[in-house]
Image (tube, rainbow, N blue to C red):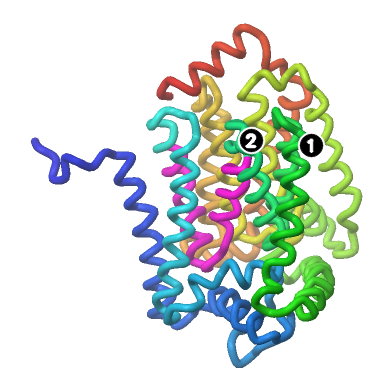
Amino acid sequence: MKRKFPWLTGYQWLWILYLLIAVACWGLKVLGHNQNNFLIFRGSFYHLIHQLNLYAAYPAEHNDYYYYGPLFGLFFAPFALPPKIIGLLLWETANAAAFLYVIHLLPFSIRRKKLLLLFCAIEFANSVFSEQFNPMIAAFIILSFLLVEKKQDVWATFLIVLGALMKLYPIAGLAFFMFSKNKPRFILFTLIWGVVLLALPALFCGPDFLIESYRHWLPAVAHKNSLNHDLLARSQDICIMGVVRDFTQDPNIPDLPFLIFGAIVFAIPLFRFKQYRSFKFRLQIMITTLIMVVIFSTGGESPTYIIPVTGVFLWILIQERPFKPWIIVLIVTLLVITGLGMSDVMPPGVRHNLIGKYGMKGWPCIIAWFVISYELLFKDFTTEEAIQEEQQVITASV
């Protein structure tokens, strides 16, 4: 039997699926007249150019506050200038395109890329349904790593600084400095891009307003962080610290000890210099970066989990045997608990009184992070057997 569209492969159909998810979420938001996050982002551009406080309340425009950097308002211009309906459509499809593009660049077989896209589809839908920026954040981190691998530090540092000045997560990409073949160049362009991108919005709003905006930004984020500790505010704080607060029912448990622990566990493998010759080791550092920026953030919420979930599924698919029984259990929990647990698919009693109450959406990613970190701390990625496995993963199907 001939295929109806013989020129389209399964991989290309998955690209179409992601674009259809983006368009479907756009349609649901337009029909439901519920575009709050998009209106916040859109408003940031107009507030920036009209020199209005970015971090003030604007109840006539939207129902929440803006927490991103001033640069994001300028970044959002292509989506803010068209009519709202068109701008939202462009925003949703741009997130899909960015995510698809960076997955396409990964040095894996088409079959592994197809599996990765299939596994991430639910979480991608969660993010774009909330009109969020997170698929692009994941793309920024992955692409900055791939650019360092290709000795293109100029553009790698551009993405790291650009992302960090909008939503702080991509600053973790500075860890890829350790893999750079030209470290002075990496440092130089990090500084250059830092100066250029910090100052760039001043061309549209003036230097005085920009300086005032930067003064407001970090206090606004710090205030939001304190609000996230509220045990009743279950849309946020889905992270390691939040899980502990949930179980102890103590909102006063501090973040700092957990952040220090995470930083130490992340930093120690970076000093295993002999392991650097293994691409799998370097890739696994990038993977743990994707996971950590969310599971150690009190701003972790359901739409942000496209970032760590992409990391966990990447790690699964670089295993020689990615479908061992315990990994299958992990895949199922990622799809059901993390992917669907906070959605309307889950019965309300389970969603609110179990998964939401105890931050269970984050559990599979947290467990995977401990396993991945153990490997980075103790596994030898440079044995002949490990190198052969690495080559097989890159070139072969699962």
Please tell me whether residue 281 belongs to the stretch shown in magenta.
no
Q: Which residue is mark 2?
A: 148
Left or right position of 197 against 89: right
Please tell me whether residue 143 belongs to the stretch shown in magenta.
yes
Q: Which residue is mark 1?
A: 266
| Vertical side of 97 occupied by 106: above or below | above
Residue 172 image point, x, y percent: 73, 46
Magenta-highlighted stretch: main secondary structure?
helix
Residue 297 image point, x, y percent: 75, 55
Q: Give me the residue at 51% from left, 26% from top.
A: 322
Give residue 25's quadrant in the image: bottom left
Residue 247 image point, x, y percent: 79, 55
Residue 365 seen by the camera = no
Q: Point out the image quarter for the C terminus.
A: top left
Left or right position of 278 against 257: left
Q: Which residues are magenta?
A: 115-144
Alpha-carbon span between mark 1 and mark 2: 19 Å
